[in-house]
Amino acid sequence: MRQRSKLAGTAALVAIVLFTGACSNNDTADTGSPPASGAAGSAGSGSGGGGTLSIANAITTDPIIPMTVDTATTRVMDLVWTGLVRYDDKLAPYNANAESITSSDATTWDVKLKKDYTFSDGTPVTADSYIDAWNYSAYGPNAAQSASFFSSIKGSDATNPATPEGATTPPAPTSKTMSGLKKVGDYEFTVTLSKPMSTFPSILGYSVFYPMPKAFFDDPAAYAKLPIGNGPYKMTKLVPGQEVDLVKDTNYQHEDAGKADGINFISFSEDTAAYTAVQGDQLDYAAVPTAYLKTFQTDFPGHSALVTGTTMMDMQVPLYNPQYADPNVRIALSMAIDRKSIVDAILPGAATPADGWVTPPLPGYQTGVCGENCTFNPDKAKELWAKANFTGDVVITTLDPQKTLFTSVCQSISDTLGVKCSVNSIADRTSYKAIAQAFKAPGPIRWGWAIDYPTMENMLVPRFVANGSSNWMKYDSDEFQTLIDKANAASDDTAAAKAFNEAQGVLAKDMPDIPIYFQQGAGVWSTDTKDLVITGFGWPDLLKAYKSS
Amino acid sequence: MLKFAGRRLLQFIPVLIGATAICWALVWALPGDPFRGRCGQVACSDQYVAAMTQKYGLDRPLVVQYLVYLKNLLTGNLGQTFSGQDISDVISRALPVTARLAIISIVIQVVLAASIGIYSGLKQNGIVDVTALFTSLILFSLPIFVVAFVAQYVLGVKLGWVKPTVSPAAPTSELILPAAVLAIGIMATLMRILRASVAEGLHSDYLRTARSKGFKESRVVGVHLMRNVMAPALNVLGLEFAALLGGTVIVEGIFNIKGVGGVIYKAIQDREQLTVATMVTVVIIFYLVINLIVDIICAMLDPRSRDV
């Protein structure tokens, strides 16, 4: 009898396995998501389209709506929505949903919309779709992560007031709408900025500025379960933080309609797993993790790419820390870092030494704006260090993924200046951010920047303007601010670029932040994926890629 | 038996409350405001931090927060994550995947470890015994991520026998490789325990009595020996199953399994007290129930260990 009960036990376990296996197989069938092999969809022969792409993209659990600020989520939104502008392969904006965006003084902008755009539920995209969405984001109590991106619009300080000096909580907003947004007609509205910004049209392609349908305002929680937009693709399935499946919206009849029939984004917690999945033909695109930088081109001959990207790595230096108050200290540190050797050793071929604070693909970029202050020069560095009165050790704070990098940076500093340098590597992202945001960094702190939208302004303003949304150094320079204002008010792109580059000259002199490298974007894809091009954003143009069966 | 089970169930309650409270307090004690860092590379506006703090009640005293949490838990309201998801959804997505992975891993272990371990015990120092010893110790000593990477690369990429990663729906067929990787790491323990128990049991009095009674060898070993050998093995299995349920972050990362480990890890990083405490509570309940079942089975098998 005991034997039978032992057998029965094993049989029960096996039965559970088979049962749950059968259940999950049914689940896979019921969801109706197209298989990753891309057999669904029209034939790719000749038509240059079709198939379903599966792309590795580390989406978070935050709702996939314009109020969420997260690079991976933006990439999904760029397919489900069409904003006022899109960006071409030179990262310059071109009108998409907008008919025209004009201004005579770079302060008040008149936006006219094309009349033939609809959300995928059939409702039209009107001026209200934009105005209501932007006001929703800018209104503090709505707890939108995107609120700070509307600070340039007049009236945003009334909808999103900051905490005054000495108080612990901010005051209640005095307005639900921004006074700078005015509806002129069903398909026209004006935006008044608090200060002139000639590059304003360039920022409007960023996902925080996308329009929202009435369905969102009626019930945001229900809407977030499967958001709808006005773009070439619509969502068919959304598992927060895991997977979002898109299918081509056949009603979308504009120039930027996509080629693939479907695009599935799958979140991988480890980028090495995504890379292996592409190798095993289970996935169509993955970014190249650092570990595979040396081998990816041989692993994927003919279907990989290395592209100059718009991401940079740098160290913010805490100016509030008396150790680093002397600019000679900061410049000496910058000159003591042998960027080229470090980059060649750790990120071979995938990064270039940074020579400024704006990355190469951006319109207006100029080489060498930092000049000799960002060039490895041991003698000059020692000279400046001797002049300065640095006491104590240099402690660099970083996140774990960049531990090796900053250990090398530390080594370079130690070898050149003779000062003891150590790395404080933190695994937990929230703790690491808290150190910067609480102004408690014991020394230079790893930061980095990836563009939200492709302008020099985005690379310089949030990090270096006084009280900027990413300024953790407490850097405050009137000279810098004047040049930024001049650039923003400039009448043409050349004049603006000139002023932005002069502003970088000020940064080179003050060195509040030490640039390390500009990152390339590297990606690999499967053999059946066609027409995949990685843009200056470091991400493929998914409107042009497709999968042949 | 019922009294025994009932007493044990009552003991669950203080364990659950204590463990939940500790988890809750530990996540709260971690440095960093949960809301300041949620806006990517830019600062979240003060309004955002204030609105979220108020919405999730984090401005109330810690004790009040905890009591509200307990009250909600008892009424079935598991609350929401900071991204607005229902925690019940999060758990109902992650737990079944981890449970299936754990069950498959246990089955693989039982089949392999039982057959090899028992055989090794019966035929000690034979070729099977010695090979099994060395192989299991080598696999046991290798870091699990090495085994996982190699298995994934060789079987998934080079040979193409299996898919290298697990798709989000996690069908059982795709879970077999990660389950085997997990099993290989801990199988050695079970094998050695079974071998030792069997070897010891072969020399015991009751076995001699059974043989002298004239039973067939298969009955002697299959019934009498097995019954006495199973108790320690079941205990180990129970512990391992509970450990697997707690989530195996490394294997989950390598194979991209959306299980409990990843959820708890991410929740700790995001300072989601509710998610961590609730998920840990659910896992602890499973752990306690499994231990109870193992104890009951052991008690049924061996009257001497019945707890009265």
Image: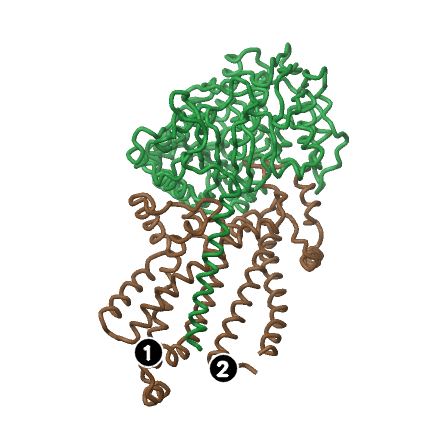
Chain colours: A green, B brown
Where residue A331 sits in the image (x, y, percent)?
44, 31
Q: Is B262 above or below relative to A501?
A: below
Residue closer to the observer: A433 or A273: A273
Subunit bearing disc 1: B
Instruction: Single out the mark in the foreground, 1 or 2.
Output: 1
Q: Is residue A288 left or right of residue A362?
A: left
Q: Residues under labels 1 and 2: Cα distance?
A: 26 Å
Instruction: Tell me which corner region of the image, top left, top right, bottom left or bottom right, holds residue B183.
Output: bottom left
Subunit bearing disc 2: B
Disc 1 marks a residue whose amino acid type is Ser
Sooner in the amino-acid sequence: mark 1 or mark 2: 1
Residue closer to the observer: A371 or A546: A546
Where residue B280 sits in the image (x, y, percent)?
56, 58
Q: Which residue is disc 1 drawn over?
A: B218
> Which numbered marker is on residue B156?
none
Instruction: Tell me which corner region of the image, top left, top right, bottom left or bottom right, holds residue A490.
Output: top right
Residue shown at the point (70%, 21%) measured from the top left = A181
Label 2 Cα neighbours within 10 Å, binned few <14 / some 14-19 / many ≥20: few
Where residue B242 sits in the image (x, y, percent)?
49, 63
Quadrant position of the C terminus of chain B in the picture = bottom right
Residue shown at the point (36%, 28%) measured from the top left = A305
Element marked by disc 1: helix
Q: Is residue B132 left or right of residue A263?
A: left
Disc 2 marks a residue whose amino acid type is Ser
Instruction: Tell me which corner region of the image, top left, top right, bottom left or bottom right, holds residue A340.
Output: top left
Residue A386 visible? The answer is no
Q: Is B122 above or below relative to B28?
A: below
Where residue A165 sits in the image (x, y, percent)?
70, 37
> Which numbered marker is on residue B305?
2
Residue A425 visible? The answer is yes
Residue shown at the point (58%, 18%) measured from the top left = A201
Residue closer to the observer: A436 or B108: B108
